[in-house]
Image: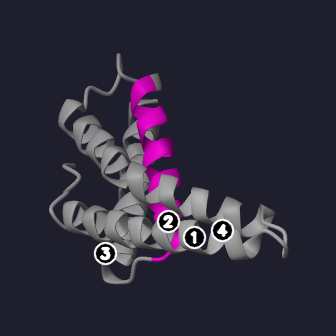
Amino acid sequence: MMNWLRKEIKAERRTLERARRRFVRNPTDDRLHHVRTSSRRLRSLLDDTAALACAPRLLRAVKRTAKSTDAARDAAVMRALLERTVSAEELYHAKALLADLRVQERHAIRKAREKLRRVSYPA
């Protein structure tokens, strides 16, 4: 069982590292989503098997990843929600808010990208 667990952790760590590199190279909403889902899967695996697979440094790095991407994902979700739900009649009034959300999103993505450049996931 320990071999299986080690292989699973290694595979999830590789998946997260690949998603992180892709996001850092070219940040998009989709790549941000992949970083977040990969980190969530690995974190769940580490949390659920903490008694068997003690990996506190890896868990801290995964938590830093999630924290680094929270603001970017929140801004992207808010902007997308507003764009989907605003009617044509309301669009004129929502333009300033949408523009502000786009600026916030770009800033948050830039910060997430800078932070994720420095993150590494110990084996």
Q: In this picture, which residue range is highlighted in magenta?
A: 28-47
Disc 1: which residue: 98
Of the numbered discs 3 and 2, the one sitting upstream in the chain is: 3
| Contact between labelled residues 1 and 4, with CB atoms less than 8 Å apart | yes
Q: Secondary structure at mark 1?
A: helix
Is any atom of residue 11 visible in this view?
yes
Q: Residue furthest front?
A: 93
The amino acid beneath tag 4 is Ala
Is residue 41 positioned above or below 30 on the image?
above
Residue 94: where, in percent of width, then height?
66, 68
Residue 52: where, in percent of width, then height?
35, 21
Q: Secondary structure at mark 2?
A: helix
Q: Secondary structure at mark 3?
A: helix
The amino acid beneath tag 1 is Leu
The amino acid beneath tag 2 is Leu
Disc 2: which residue: 101
Of the numbered discs 2 and 4, the one sitting upstream in the chain is: 4
Disc 3: which residue: 24
